[in-house]
């Protein structure tokens, strides 16, 4: 879905990608620099998309670009990606916004609020927005917005942009885009369209596969394993198919979605809901292994009861962020707030308030849930 720069309030769904690229590039006539911002705590898709947009503008309009992000670059794979591919990603606190009159937002949208380009910061600047997530109402306020559509990753859309603009990505950029698609679609196994398959195969021959392997298998800090153990010990299962976990404080917010991903791979699990706390905010990630439900829709509905919160996502994965109220200071109060939000998510997923959970991890005796052994036979207590 594309909003024309000359008619920002009019939605035009008929433009081809080639026409969209033409409209986008015309915006940069007379402009020499652009700031391109990912969502906070960026993932590979957001990082690669920002890099691709910058390279497109540089190649076709001679625009110099700066890539920035809010939050932290936390997950080991993401840090390895930026390091090995030498992606020039700069923390937002080091940015002087006065240097830019055009700003871009990728893999998120203005009203989602999980990014550093708040309305007060971009007043008087042209805004472009490119995102594969479902369109939000205020994206129409951008001078150029290409949001929604049948794409499993924003990197897919940017790969099509480069192709239509006849810009061949170098090995560095191709590898970033390939990994962005690979990670967001889980190796083309999650919410994939024909456009994703084309982009993935188009990039294969240009991609440095040993680097992809190095990104996927980084060395992990010992703290990571502490969090993993805590997740297994604290996770609870409701009704045999909903797993929930309060991680408590974490050293990087990325551990919340990573834990949700891991718990969602357990046999029989259809819903994985994880909350954690980083600095003064609650983070929540939701994964759904059931095509009848939309994680993004559910989390957006829940967050309407929390005016200070933000949420986004799509069919099988979504996330939310909620700042602690100033009055919530003690550890006990913070725990209560996290678990209250987790309970709200569980109820939205269909878990009743009085349903009793079971431990996620089997006991050391070999029993599984409901007192059954691994072969499914009931084992009596000693």
Image (cartoon, rainbow, N blue to C red):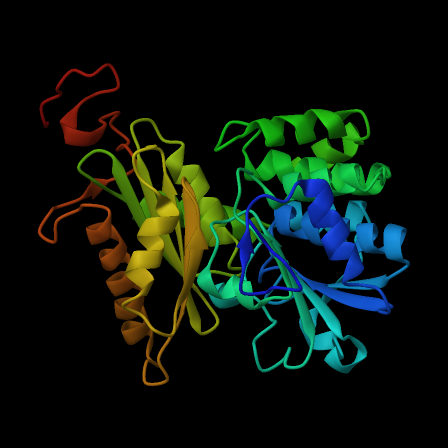
Q: Who's the residue at 61% across and 45% down the image?
A: 154
Residue 114 in view, yes or no: no
Between residues 221 and 81, which one lies in front from this camera angle? 81
- Residue 145: x %, y % from top left: 61, 57
- Residue 254: x %, y % from top left: 53, 54
- Residue 380: x %, y % from top left: 9, 23
Q: Is residue 82 left or right of residue 249?
A: right
Instruction: Name the quarter where the C terminus is drawn.
Output: top left
Q: Is residue 17 left or right of residue 84?
A: left
Between residues 64 and 317, which one lies in front from this camera angle? 64
Q: Who's the residue at 31% across and 39% down the image?
A: 293
Q: Is residue 43 above or below residue 70?
A: above
Q: Is residue 238 above or below residue 114?
A: above
The quadrant in which residue 358 appears is: top left
Count of numbered tags: 0
Q: Who's the residue at 84% across and 38% down the image?
A: 166
Between residues 229 and 295, which one lies in front from this camera angle? 295
Q: Is residue 44 left or right of residue 307?
A: right
Residue projecting furthest to the bottom: 327
- Residue 101: x %, y % from top left: 76, 75
């Amino acid at each position: 879905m594309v909003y024309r720069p000359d008619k920002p309030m009019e939605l035009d769904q008929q433009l081809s990608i080639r026409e969209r690229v033409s409209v986008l590039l015309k915006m940069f006539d007379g402009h020499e620099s652009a700031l391109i911002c990912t969502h906070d705590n960026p993932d590979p898709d957001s990082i690669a998309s920002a890099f691709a947009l910058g390279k497109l503008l540089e190649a076709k309009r001679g625009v110099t670009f700066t890539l920035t992000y809010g939050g932290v670059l936390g997950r080991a794979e993401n840090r390895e990606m930026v390091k090995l591919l030498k992606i020039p990603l700069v923390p937002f606190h080091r940015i002087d916004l006065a240097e830019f009159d055009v700003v871009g937002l990728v893999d998120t949208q203005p009203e989602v609020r999980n990014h550093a380009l708040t309305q007060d910061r971009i007043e008087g600047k042209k805004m472009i927005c490119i995102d594969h997530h479902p369109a939000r109402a205020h994206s129409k306020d951008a001078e150029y917005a290409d949001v929604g559509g049948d794409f499993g990753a924003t990197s897919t859309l940017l790969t099509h942009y480069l192709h239509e603009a006849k810009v061949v990505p170098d090995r560095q950029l191709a590898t970033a885009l390939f990994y962005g698609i690979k990670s967001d679609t889980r190796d083309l196994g999650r919410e994939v369209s024909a456009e994703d398959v084309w982009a993935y195969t188009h990039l294969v021959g240009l991609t440095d596969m040993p680097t992809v392997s190095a990104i996927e298998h980084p060395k992990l800090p010992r703290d990571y394993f502490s969090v993993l153990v805590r997740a297994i010990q604290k996770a609870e299962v409701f009704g045999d198919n909903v797993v929930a976990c309060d991680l408590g404080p974490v050293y990087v917010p990325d551990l919340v979605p990573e834990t949700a991903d891991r718990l969602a791979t357990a046999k029989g699990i259809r819903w994985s809901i994880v909350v954690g706390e980083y600095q003064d905010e609650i983070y929540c990630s939701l994964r759904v292994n059931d095509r009848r439900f939309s994680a993004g829709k559910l989390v957006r509905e829940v967050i309407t009861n929390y005016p200070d919160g933000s949420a986004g996502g799509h069919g099988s994965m979504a996330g939310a962020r909620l700042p602690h109220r100033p009055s919530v200071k003690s550890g006990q109060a913070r725990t209560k707030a996290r678990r209250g939000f987790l309970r709200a998510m569980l109820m939205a997923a269909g878990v009743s308030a009085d349903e009793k959970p079971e431990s996620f991890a089997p006991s050391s005796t070999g029993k599984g849930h409901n007192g059954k052994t691994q072969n499914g036979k009931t084992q009596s207590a000693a």
